[in-house]
Amino acid sequence: MTIKSPLQGSPAVGRPDRRAGFGPRRRSGRPGAGTLASFIAPGLVLFLLFVILPVLFAAYVAFFRWNGLGGVPTDFIGLENFRTMLADKVFLGDLWRLAIIVVLSLVIQLPLAFGLAMLLHQRFPGRTAFRLIFFVPYVLTEAVTAVLFGLVFSPRRGFADSLLASLGVEAQIGWLSDRDIVLFVIFGILVWKFFGFHMILFLAGRQNIPEELYEAAAIDGATGTQAFRSITLPLMGPTVRMIVFLSVIGSVQLFDLVFVLTGGGPFHASETLAITMYEQGFQRNQIGYASALSIAMFAVSLVFALFYQRLVLNRDLQGSLTTAGNRS
């Protein structure tokens, strides 16, 4: 009688049984063209309908004098709308106000959000509650924010004037009616509204930095300031650059909050590119000129995005592609 070894009839020692579901399996093939097309097609159709076609139509209408009625435009005027736009003091003022908002955002809002994110990264009781409190303003819509601060800065009975009166200051300040300060008041509201969003992004970027780097720096005798300068700032670079990009593009598209709060007044002192385009198109029925303004907004955003990507984001994108290629 032959006695079988316990190992006979079983998988070889050291060789995983693939039939039992163990061991390495072959990597499944990449999805076919039909599968990719089925996923891409719906988004591509929506993008064409709601982005590409409106941009092309606006670019076409910008060369006509048209009030939006009577079918397709027929009164071709060439570059007249663009010449009018470049000579329009309101449009040039919009560009100046855009530059002010962008500079103030980069100098005040983003450093404030960055510092607050570094503070809330530390461990202390209640930090989760503080994160939530600082993020809540971003959840509010811009229209609700405008109505809220319209009550705060309401003349005579608003919270701002009441607070000054309680401090012994009886001066009546035209927060939203003084053309010299209205833009800075709006910027303060924008800081209150959006710094929580930027704070969360900065906080996410900080949490992605391995703590082992700080431990190694501490072992080498680095101080907190040296670690911040040599580790935190360089590794937070991609996050900072992306937030700067979002802040500038958001400033170009600013509309809802200013429109509900001041309507662009007084005397165009708080007007933005989007508000000027809305007034020309829907209040004065100059659809051709409004289309030229929309093309100008699109051009400003596109030129900035292209230059910023080439000069600033290109290194980050190349690093991401290189990392992805190495992993695959």
Image (cartoon, grey):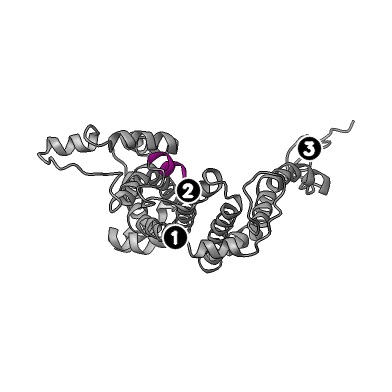
Give the residue number, with chain letter if any, for mark 1: 95
| Quadrant the N terminus occupies | top right
Q: Residue at x 27, y 44 (%)?
A: 175
Residue furthest right as drawn: 1
Q: Which is closer to the viewer, label 3 or label 2?
A: 2
* Res 140 seen here: no
Q: What is the spatial separation of the Cα atoms under label 3 and label 1, in whole angstroms?
A: 81 Å
Residue furthest left as drawn: 168
How many residues crowd around disc 3 within 10 Å: few (fewer than 14), some, or many (20 or more)? few
Disc number placed over residue 275 in the picture, else none: 2
- Sequence-wise, the earlier of marks 3 and 2 is 3
Identified by mark 3, the residue type is: Leu
Residue 186 lies, in percent from the top left, at 34, 47
Identified by mark 1, the residue type is: Leu
Give the residue number, with chain letter if any, for mark 3: 7
Q: Which residues are magenta?
A: 253-261
Task: Give the image quarter of residue 317.
Answer: bottom right
User: Tag 1's secondary structure?
Assistant: helix
Of residues 157 and 19, which is closer to you in this image? 157
- Sequence-wise, the earlier of marks 3 and 1 is 3
